[in-house]
């Protein structure tokens, strides 16, 4: 697998950004993040419907492997079961709302 680019786009082309973090202190607590990498990738996307775009989200997480992926406008009801939107190696923190909502996928390497 290749190393993620400093700026990459989502499979849908709507644009997410990998934001490298070069100021991460070396020798930090290894259970928080693999500090040998010396970067931290966060992505953001206005998804405009997680249910209809989940395949792209899953593909993006599997191949780009950001540490955090923030999604807005998930457009799922508050009562929606989040398990169909789970992705291996990621913890999903949902705040679903029917005409709005957001969520974050957190790589399991991080303490959340």
Image (cartoon, helix red, strand yellow):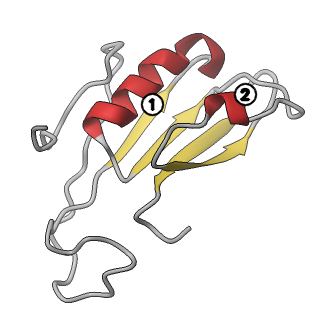
Closest to the observer, 37 or 78? 37
Image position of 15 (left or right of 57)? left
The residue where tag 1 is placed is: 45
- Asked if residue 70 is positioned above or below residue 91 in the image, the reply reads above
- For the C terminus, the quadrant is bottom right
Image position of 110 (left or right of 104)? left
Given contact means CB atoms under 8 Å apart, are the residues at marks 2 and 1 in contact?
A: no
Query: Which quadrant of the view contains residue 78?
Result: top right
Could you say where residue 7 lies in the image, as x and y percent from the top left?
Answer: 17, 37
Q: Residue at x 25, y 71 (%)?
A: 34
Query: Which quadrant of the view contains residue 102?
Result: top right
In 3D space, how far apart are the residues under numbered discs 2 and 1 (Cα atoms)? 13 Å
The residue where tag 2 is placed is: 100
- Asked if residue 52 is positioned above or below residue 66 in the image, the reply reads above
Image position of 35 (left or right of 88)? left
Q: Residue furthest right?
A: 79
Q: Secondary structure at mark 1?
A: strand
Could you say where residue 76 lies in the image, as x and y percent from the top left?
Answer: 76, 24
Q: Secondary structure at mark 2?
A: loop
Q: Residue at x 36, y 13 (%)?
A: 12
Q: Residue at x 42, y 38 (%)?
A: 44
Could you say where residue 80 lies in the image, as x and y percent from the top left?
Answer: 83, 29
Closest to the observer, 60 or 19? 60
Query: Which quadrant of the view contains residue 15?
Result: top left
Crowding at mark 1 (Cα within 10 Å: few <14, some 14-19, many 20+)? some
Crowding at mark 2 (Cα within 10 Å: few <14, some 14-19, many 20+)? some
Could you say where residue 11 lies in the image, as x and y percent from the top left?
Answer: 31, 17
């Amino acid at each position: 697998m290749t190393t993620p680019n400093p700026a990459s786009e989502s499979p849908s082309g709507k644009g997410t950004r990998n934001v490298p973090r070069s100021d991460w202190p070396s020798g930090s607590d290894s259970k928080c993040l693999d500090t040998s990498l010396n970067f931290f990738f966060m992505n953001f996307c206005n998804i405009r419907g997680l249910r209809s775009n989940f395949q792209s989200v899953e593909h993006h997480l599997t191949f780009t492997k950001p540490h955090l992926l923030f999604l807005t406008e998930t457009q799922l009801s508050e009562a929606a079961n989040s398990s169909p939107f789970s992705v291996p190696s990621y913890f999903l923190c949902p705040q679903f709302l029917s005409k709005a909502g957001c969520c974050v996928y957190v790589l399991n390497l991080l303490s959340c």
